[in-house]
Image (cartoon, rainbow, N blue to C red):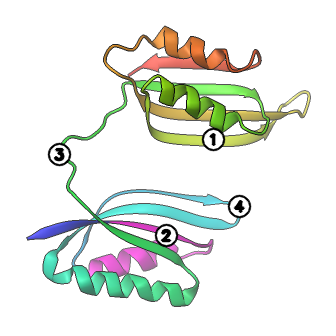
Amino acid sequence: MSGFLIISIMADDRPGLVETLSHIIRENEGSWLESRMSHLAGKFAGIVQVQVNDNKKQSLTEALMLLKDQNWLITIEESLPTQQKNKPNAKLNIVGNDRPGIVSDVSQVLAKLGVNVLELNTQFESAAMSAEALFKTQADIQTPANADLDDVRDALENISNDLMVELKSV
């Protein structure tokens, strides 16, 4: 019988991190199913879903925990197999002047409307002409069946008069 693990990692970015992680998973007969990984501010962070036989789960966990000796931050959680994957039904893009609390404001509106954020990417950029700080976000979201995308867009645009919101069904 096999089980599923969710492994989250963070370490100082350097070549070979993914290879180290994948090698340990392979050596313990695990199967790398899904992952999201990224470099950010000199760190490399990620989350990986692994399927592994129950008789190898302990050895995989022990081998992964040894990475802490190399200054990795690592957590391992058992998970259930996903019966039905949450699939996005819309893509959200927002651009506006950056300010403290903007992510909190956006996420609060989405939560109040029952919108599930499945993937979120944010970035800070300087505007081309003015060099003002711009907030940009791209998200895959799942709206409730009865939600109107125009209502979601309007609620987000009401946060601030400088936000440009694009919301498209997928």
Q: CA distance from mark 4 to mark 2?
A: 15 Å
Label 2, secondary structure: give it. Answer: strand
Label 3, on which residue?
83
Q: CA distance from mark 3 to mark 2?
A: 25 Å
Q: CA distance from mark 4 to mark 3?
A: 35 Å
* Disc sitting over residue 104 in the figure: none
Say which of marks 3 and 1 sits in front.
3
Label 4, on which residue?
41
Of the residues shown, which amino acid type is indicated by label 4?
A: Ala
Quarter of the image where the C terminus is located: top left
The disc, 4 or 2, on the residue closer to the chain's N-terminal end is: 2
Label 2, on which residue?
9
- Given contact means CB atoms under 8 Å apart, are the residues at marks 4 and 1 in contact? no
Label 3, secondary structure: give it. Answer: loop
Mark 2 crowd level (few <14, some 14–19, many ≥20, 10 Å Cα): many
> What are the residue bounds of the magenta stretch?
6-28
Q: Residue at x 29, y 82 (%)?
A: 60
Residue 148: in magenta span? no
Of the residues shown, which amino acid type is indicated by label 1?
A: Thr
The disc, 3 or 2, on the residue closer to the chain's N-terminal end is: 2
Q: Position of residue 100 (x, y in %)?
A: 77, 39
The disc, 3 or 1, on the residue closer to the chain's N-terminal end is: 3
The disc, 4 or 1, on the residue closer to the chain's N-terminal end is: 4
Q: As rendered, which of 67 and 158 lies closer to the eye?
A: 158
Q: CA distance from mark 2 to mark 1?
A: 20 Å
Q: Is residue 145 visible?
A: yes
Q: Position of residue 16 (x, y in %)?
A: 52, 77
| Extreme residue toward the left, this view | 1
